[in-house]
């Protein structure tokens, strides 16, 4: 491999090692494999263009063009197309996916889910950095300057992730990659001067044997490696040893200053982002405490935000205009006088912990008045309060706030909901939109579940009971939240998830039936203490669907089959087929998992089944029996593991098989070739110009063999001389030939260092004979084909000549 080719490989490797620092930013590292593949292709294109050779500008243009085409190939179909033709795709669709990634980066907390947009940003960013590194290090031959884009990549990743326990490892990888790039360029520059000068010849080495001043001149390279290792060690150890550098490049956040660690603050703007991690958190911190005069504390959900826009990838809050917080909030949309006059106004005094920095204010729905200090803004449609901007990158939060909320405790009846008139056309149009790429199975399942229902209320109750009672769904906070248009379809097929899956799916299915729907995010009522104060912890984070009924407004439903959740009375269907029986006493609000003990009765009451107090139903057992990876997936992963493990071992297996075949033949020349290859693998390159005796002395000297191994080498060399020069019929081989070759090989490996020994086993230099054999075979085939073609051409020419000579004779008559 040429020096420039090695430089290309190390430039790509340095970029890939530095890109590992981006891994803490997302939940999955699947994008790294894709980035490595595209980076390899981009580097290969650059190497090919420089070999042609092309101008530097054309080389970069070729790499950029191929990278764009590959990105288009990998990310095609990830977003709904809005045009036709390649230009529309690159300008519109590709740009939309990129903009979606930028939006996701700003919305999700770290580690963020690996959405298609975020994956595009990560992969394209690595390719851009890789192109700059390749341009500076290989094309422009300035590897030192290539550290700037590598440093930029690492700095961005470290700044976003905030350091952490793995930051030192990321820095070590990035530093090793950059040092390898510098060393590769240094060796290439030295090689351009000719012979690399090294240590003085060993004493006693013949001047013409090639032993002393041969190619083993590696002092400058070893010295550079030692300097690099020392610099890396100091960069890793010194910040840890000096207290003043705790919060530096490699230091993590101090106690109490983090963003989600132990003792830190919770700073996600949208609690939906960290909802799953909150439900699984071991540290169940109390974030809110409140006291209320509500007669139904079990219905006191603290609502934060309404997600009313479904774009096929996720639910999110649509951007709406904010106003000043009114002293008396307007009547909630859709709420009629009949239900409003039957409601009870309750007062709730809430205190937020110092570690809760949410910008959206948790409060009961619908609130009629809020008394809170600070700068807040009101969003009328979603009826939420949002912290105003206090300065550059600083916003008003609920951290440590004490506030009072007056709200309405609505008590609609099932009959009022069932007889609700058609919703306002504007509300129906906005809140029943579904994306075109929503899988058809979502709407088909919704229509199948609600078949026979005559009104929207009955359809809503059937959807709720399908998820909570009869559909065989299982509550599991370990299930991946998932994004994309197929997320709902996967959930309907797998039938396991947590509140996000149930709320999103019921809202989407309701919209396909023409029922206005959105998703609310907040907290369940919490756990009441003996002194009357209610504690709300992070495990009480929850999401639920809200459906719109004219005269009642936005109404909460509860499809999540989790113990500790209160099912609204109005959502219990009046029909016996859909109405749950009287519920059993609710367990503690802090519980998050259904009771494991199955019901002793053969028939589980719907109410207990709804609350997760019974054993798994038959559909759940069937779903569990069919769960797990498919045979195809298992075979595919097994093949991948075998390929990853087996490919590095192929040279080792090839050498072992070749050695066994050579030594088993008993031929002296085959054994000599094996000994020469073993010495080559250990670093002693073969020299075919030397006689067997001189070659043996060279192997003994350069290989630093012990006396026993040296004697074995000389015995094999003596047998080779007899085979070459003895008269026909003389005995040239001997019984211990194979053992001498093995002893010599063991001595060569024993005298080598650890890394050379490992390379001799896994990456033997003698494997170059494979490429030589392939090249010779190709040349032989080409020569044979050329000779065959020449023979055929000559034969055809001879036949034509003979035919031309005979044709005039046929036309002659008798004289």
Image (tube, rainbow, N blue to C red):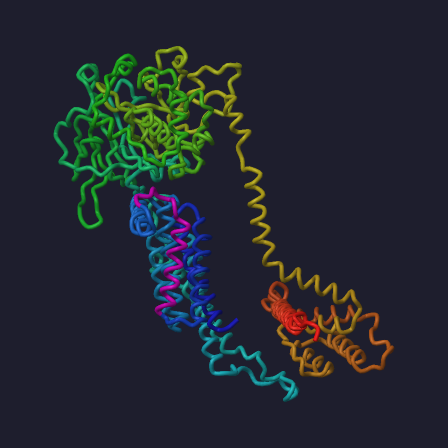
**Position of residue 28 measured from the top left corner of the image (x, y, whole percent):** 43, 46
The vertical placement of 143 against 424, above or below, is: below
Verify whether residue 63 appears in magenta. Answer: yes
Taking the image as shown, residue 807 lies to the left or right of residue 64, namely right
In which quadrant of the rendered view does residue 658 lie? bottom right
In which quadrant of the rendered view does residue 43 lie? bottom left
Residue positioned 24% across, 29% down in the render: 429
Res 765 visible: no
What secondary structure characterizes most of the magenta part?
helix
**Position of residue 774 measured from the top left corner of the image (x, y, whole percent):** 62, 67
Q: Nearer the viewer, residue 245 or 32?
A: 32
Taking the image as shown, residue 513 lies to the left or right of residue 196, namely left
Magenta residues span 57-83
Res 714 visible: yes
Location of the C terminus (image quadrant): bottom right
Residue positioned 69% across, 83% down in the render: 690
Taking the image as shown, residue 117 lies to the left or right of residue 11, namely left
Q: Nearer the viewer, residue 781 or 349?
A: 781
**Position of residue 621 measured from the top left corner of the image (x, y, whole percent):** 53, 25
**Position of residue 172 measured from the top left corner of the image (x, y, whole percent):** 44, 61
Residue positioned 37% across, 56% down in the render: 68
In which quadrant of the rendered view does residue 360 lie? top left
Taking the image as shown, residue 434 lies to the left or right of residue 166, namely left
The vertical placement of 123 against 53, above or below, is: above
Verify whether residue 484 appears in magenta. Answer: no
């Amino acid at each position: 491999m040429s020096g420039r080719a090695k430089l290309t490989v190390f430039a790509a490797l340095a970029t890939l090692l530095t890109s590992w620092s981006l891994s803490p930013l997302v939940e999955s590292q699947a994008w790294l494999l894709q980035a490595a593949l595209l980076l390899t292709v981009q580097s290969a294109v650059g190497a090919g263009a420089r070999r042609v050779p092309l101008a530097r500008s054309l080389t970069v243009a070729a790499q950029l063009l191929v990278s764009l085409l590959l990105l288009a190939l990998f990310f095609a179909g990830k977003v709904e197309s809005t045009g036709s033709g390649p230009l529309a795709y690159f300008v519109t669709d590709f740009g939309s996916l990129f903009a979606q990634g930028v939006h996701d980066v700003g919305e999700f907390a770290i580690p963020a889910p690996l959405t298609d947009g975020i994956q595009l940003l990560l992969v394209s960013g690595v390719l851009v950095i890789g192109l700059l590194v390749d341009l500076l290090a290989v094309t422009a031959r300035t590897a030192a300057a290539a550290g700037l884009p590598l440093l930029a990549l690492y700095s961005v990743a470290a700044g976003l992730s905030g350091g952490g326990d793995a930051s030192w490892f990321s820095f070590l990888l990035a530093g090793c990659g950059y040092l390898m790039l510098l060393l590769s360029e240094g060796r290439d520059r030295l090689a351009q001067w000719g012979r690399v000068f090294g240590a003085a010849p060993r004493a006693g080495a013949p001047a013409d044997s090639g032993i002393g001043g041969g190619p083993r001149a590696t002092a400058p390279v070893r010295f550079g490696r030692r300097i690099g290792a020392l610099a890396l060690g100091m960069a890793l150890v010194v910040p840890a040893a000096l207290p003043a550098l705790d919060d530096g490049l490699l230091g993590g956040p101090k106690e109490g200053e983090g963003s989600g660690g132990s003792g830190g603050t919770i700073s996600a703007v949208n609690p939906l982002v960290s909802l799953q991690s909150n439900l699984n958190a071991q540290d169940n911190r109390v974030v809110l405490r409140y006291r209320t005069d509500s007669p139904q504390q079990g219905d006191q959900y603290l609502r934060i935000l309404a997600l009313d826009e479904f774009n096929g990838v996720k639910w999110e809050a649509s951007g709406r205009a904010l106003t000043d917080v009114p002293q008396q909030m307007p009547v909630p949309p859709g709420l009629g006088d009949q239900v409003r006059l039957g409601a009870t106004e309750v007062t709730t005094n809430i205190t937020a912990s110092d570690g809760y920095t949410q910008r959206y204010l948790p409060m009961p729905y619908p609130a009629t008045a809020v008394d809170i200090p600070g700068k807040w803004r009101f969003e009328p449609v979603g009826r939420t309060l949002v912290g105003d901007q206090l300065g550059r990158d600083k916003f008003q939060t609920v951290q440590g706030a004490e506030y009072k909320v007056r709200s309405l405790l609505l008590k609609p009846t099932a009959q009022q909901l069932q007889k609700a008139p058609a919703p306002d056309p504007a509300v129906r149009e906005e809140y029943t939109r579904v994306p075109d790429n929503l899988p058809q199975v979502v709407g088909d399942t919704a229509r199948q579940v609600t078949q026979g229902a005559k009104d929207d209320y009955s359809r809503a109750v059937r959807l709720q009971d399908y998820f909570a009672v009869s559909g065989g769904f299982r509550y599991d906070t370990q299930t991946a939240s998932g994004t994309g248009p197929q997320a709902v379809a996967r959930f309907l097929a797998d039938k396991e998830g947590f509140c996000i899956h149930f709320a999103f799916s019921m809202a989407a299915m309701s919209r396909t039936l023409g029922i206005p729907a959105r998703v609310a995010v907040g907290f369940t009522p919490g756990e009441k203490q003996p002194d009357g104060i209610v504690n709300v912890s992070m495990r009480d984070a929850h999401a639920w669907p809200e459906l719109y009924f004219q005269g009642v407004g936005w109404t909460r439903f509860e499809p999540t089959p989790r113990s500790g959740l209160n099912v609204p009375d109005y959502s219990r269907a009046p029909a016996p087929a859909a109405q749950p029986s009287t519920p059993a006493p609710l367990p503690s609000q802090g519980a998050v998992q259904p009771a494991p003990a199955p019901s002793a009765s053969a028939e589980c009451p719907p109410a207990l089944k709804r609350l997760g107090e019974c054993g798994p139903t038959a559909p759940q057992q069937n779903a569990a029996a069919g769960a797990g990876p498919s045979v195809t997936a298992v075979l595919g992963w097994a093949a991948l593991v075998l390929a990853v493990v087996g490919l590095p071992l192929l040279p080792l297996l090839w050498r072992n098989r070749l050695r066994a075949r050579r030594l088993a033949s008993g031929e002296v020349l085959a054994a000599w070739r094996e000994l020469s290859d073993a010495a080559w693998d250990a670093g002693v390159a073969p020299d075919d110009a030397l006689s067997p005796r001189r070659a043996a002395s060279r192997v003994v000297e350069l290989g630093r063999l012990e006396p026993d191994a040296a004697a074995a080498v000389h015995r094999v060399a003596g047998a080779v001389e007899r085979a070459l020069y003895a008269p026909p019929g003389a005995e040239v081989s001997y019984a211990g030939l194979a053992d001498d070759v093995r002893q010599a090989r063991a001595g060569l490996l024993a005298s080598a260092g650890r890394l050379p020994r490992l390379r001799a086993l896994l990456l033997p230099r003698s494997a170059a004979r494979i490429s030589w054999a392939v090249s010779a075979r190709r040349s032989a085939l080409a020569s044979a084909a050329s000779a065959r073609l020449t023979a055929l051409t000559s034969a055809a020419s001879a036949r034509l000549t003979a035919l031309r000579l005979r044709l005039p004779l046929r036309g002659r008559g008798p004289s």
